[in-house]
Amino acid sequence: MAKEKSTALLFARPSTEMPYAIFADLQKGTYTECSYLSLKTFICFTDMGDAAWKAALEMDEVAKIRLYQASWLEEDKEWSVRIAFLETTLELESKRYSQFGKMPQTFYMILRFNGPREQIQRYCRRIVKKLRRKPYILLNWDDLERETGYERPEVVDGWKDLLGKELASEDRIESEIYAAPTTKEPYVLYKKLFSGEYEECKMSSVYTYISFTDVGDAIYKAARAIDPKASIRLTKASLLEEDKAWTIEIEFGEDLLTLECIRYKPLGDQLKAFYIRIGFHGEEKGLEDLMNKFTENLGHDPRENLDWDALEKKKDLDREALQQTLPFKDEDGEGGDGEGAGEGDGKDMKDGTQNEE
């Protein structure tokens, strides 16, 4: 006897544009991953797409996938994929909800299900387990409501209904920290990090590596101190300076870190011409714990060697605005100004301006 079918509509936001899947193969029903340097056309399948496909394969080893639609303007980013497993069909659609901006920040995903409710419930639990976060937690709620008409409570309740339990801690904060590296070490193998593995090497290695710097090392160790199972992955690197200009994501607990090593001066090596932006998305308590461990590992104020004039020009913000994003307070309780700021033990840290979703 056939199981009664039901439908469900969910919304999510990816945190990475990786992995990349070959466009032509996916049109034929074959899933093939590739590098972003591939000469073949590919789509940014994202961590959300990856979790959706792997969850389907876990439930049905003969699950099917096919790309059936893509935007002619942004075929790599705006696309629709159909996944069929057991008696359930999922249409997974990647869409832009902000006219300007890069992926994944300005994109959201629509999940349209048709199948037995029990299968959809089991599937959604697998997705959440693979993502290690709530699929909707990174959504820009104002943009989503403008594009779809759905408000935050409706979206959250949709996931809760299928997961069959309350999801704790809906309130999240976003914070940015700017730091200046003082060493290029440690060096981490590029290919391993791209695959989600962390392996250090020597500068003389014959393999391609990135300069992870003392800042990257300190923040990763801080995340692992909080969550020994913290994951790390290289999501992007410059074609010209892949060892210096890179983006790395670290997930620990239910919190997410995005590290970006960015050039802000046209000339100079990594220690003089680059800064590191640390983006945090998670719970306020998580940020507090992370910052205490981060500065303890680093041994000094991360802002010490920042060139504020270059940073102001790069970020198109004045120094005061930049300072307000830093999760530090001086001994008098006021935010530092970058010159002598953060003197003392550096352990009394809280976010000056935290934006709730």
Image (spheres, rainbow, N blue to C red):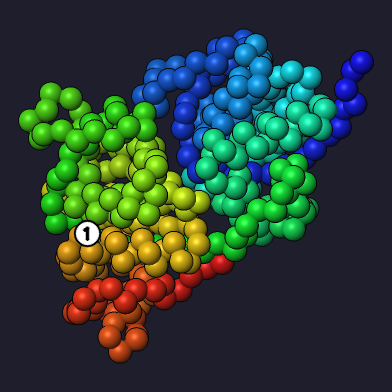
Q: Nearer the viewer, residue 299 or 110?
A: 299
Q: Indicate the quadrant where residue 194 lies.
A: top left
Q: In this view, does 138 lie above or below 348?
A: above
Q: Which residue is drawn at 74% across and 45% down?
A: 164
Q: Name the residue under label 1.
A: 297
Residue 67 visible in the displayed image: no
The quadrant of the picture occupied by the C terminus is bottom right
Q: Indicate the quadrant where residue 192 lies.
A: top left
Q: Which residue is drawn at 34% across and 49% down?
A: 224
Q: Residue at x 20, y 60 (%)?
A: 298
Q: Which residue is drawn at 28% across and 35% down?
A: 198
Q: Nearer the viewer, residue 245 or 220?
A: 220
Q: Nearer the viewer, residue 203 or 57?
A: 57
Q: Where is residue 276 in the image (x, y as percent from the top left)?
A: 28, 55
Q: What element carries label 1?
A: helix
The quadrant of the picture occupied by the N terminus is top right
Amino acid carrying mark 1 in the image = Asn
Number of marks in the rendered image? 1
Within 10 Å of the Cα at label 1, are there few (<14), some (14-19), or many (20+) other Cα atoms? some
- Determine the residue located farthest toward the bottom in the rendered image: 332
16 lies left or right of 357 = left
263 lies left or right of 194 = left
Q: Indicate the quadrant where residue 70 lies.
A: top right
338 lies left or right of 107 = left
Residue 173 visible in the displayed image: yes
Q: Position of residue 108 (x, y in %)?
A: 62, 44
Q: Position of residue 36 (x, y in %)?
A: 40, 27
